[in-house]
Image (cartoon, helix red, strand yellow):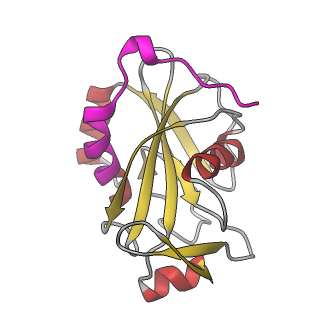
């Protein structure tokens, strides 16, 4: 997040938009439900992109993540937010596929989390203001890293819920953006 706070829409416990626009900072501080979109990125070999958050970030500085994402902006869909975040954080133009949503209570504040998947090029160009390090891990390497490294709470929850939805090798094709 930059100097300007993001505007988000409050939602209810069924993920319905309430028509109330607030800053994300206020939603987190007050514990108001809002939406966040994340993408689990895989390469053509099925490895998962893992990254360490920049130390300069206000939320979870220096922690590792298995997903790329951020707040869903006012009037934005989960899919559009996920695509925007991929472009901003990794320099990738793709339309991730929404797998599922769930009410996530493991982060800084409760929020609805839309979990996507995308197969992305091996050579990503992370935004250094957001990502301090990145690497590609096999599923087994990631399972070990989750036990040894300091990951965000969202990462643990996202990965455990993602496993039953992970793609078969024949589905590992990126969806181009128009």
Question: Where does residue 7 sit, x and y in percent of width and height?
Answer: 66, 74
The residue lying at 45 percent from left, 52 percent from top is 114
Q: Does the magenta-highlighted stretch encompass residue 168?
A: yes
Q: Does the magenta-highlighted stretch encompass residue 159?
A: yes
Q: Nearer the viewer, residue 16 or 42?
A: 16
The residue lying at 65 percent from left, 31 percent from top is 124
Q: Nearer the viewer, residue 15 or 143?
A: 15
Question: Is residue 61 at all visible to an observer of this figure?
Answer: no
Task: Determine whether, in the image, residue 61 is placed left or right of residue 107.
Answer: right
Q: Nearer the viewer, residue 162 or 9?
A: 9
Question: Is residue 30 at all visible to an observer of this figure?
Answer: yes
Which residues make up the magenta segment? 156-178
Task: Determine whether, in the image, residue 120 is placed left or right of residue 38.
Answer: right
Question: Where does residue 4 sit, x and y in percent of width and height?
Answer: 74, 76
Question: Where does residue 26 sit, x and y in percent of width and height?
Answer: 55, 86
Tally of numbered tags = 0
The residue lying at 47 percent from left, 18 percent from top is 172
Q: Nearer the viewer, residue 89 or 72?
A: 72
The residue lying at 46 percent from left, 68 percent from top is 16
Is the residue 61 above or below the residue 117 in the image? below
């Amino acid at each position: 997040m930059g100097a300007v706070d993001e505007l988000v829409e409050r939602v209810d416990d069924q993920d319905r938009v309430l028509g109330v626009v607030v800053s994300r900072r206020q939603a987190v501080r007050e514990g108001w439900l809002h939406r966040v979109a994340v993408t689990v990125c895989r390469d053509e070999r099925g490895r998962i992109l893992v990254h360490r958050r920049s130390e300069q970030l206000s939320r979870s500085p220096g922690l590792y993540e298995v997903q790329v994402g951020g707040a869903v902006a006012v009037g934005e869909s989960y899919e559009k937010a996920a695509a925007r975040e991929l472009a901003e954080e990794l320099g990738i133009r793709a339309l991730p596929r929404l797998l599922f949503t769930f009410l996530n209570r493991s982060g800084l504040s409760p929020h609805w989390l839309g979990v996507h998947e995308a197969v992305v090029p091996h050579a990503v160009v992370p935004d250094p203001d957001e990502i301090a390090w990145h690497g590609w891990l096999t599923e087994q390497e990631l399972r070990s890293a989750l036990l040894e490294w300091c990951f965000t709470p969202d990462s643990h929850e996202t990965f455990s819920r993602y496993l039953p939805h992970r793609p078969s090798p024949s589905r590992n094709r990126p969806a181009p953006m128009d």
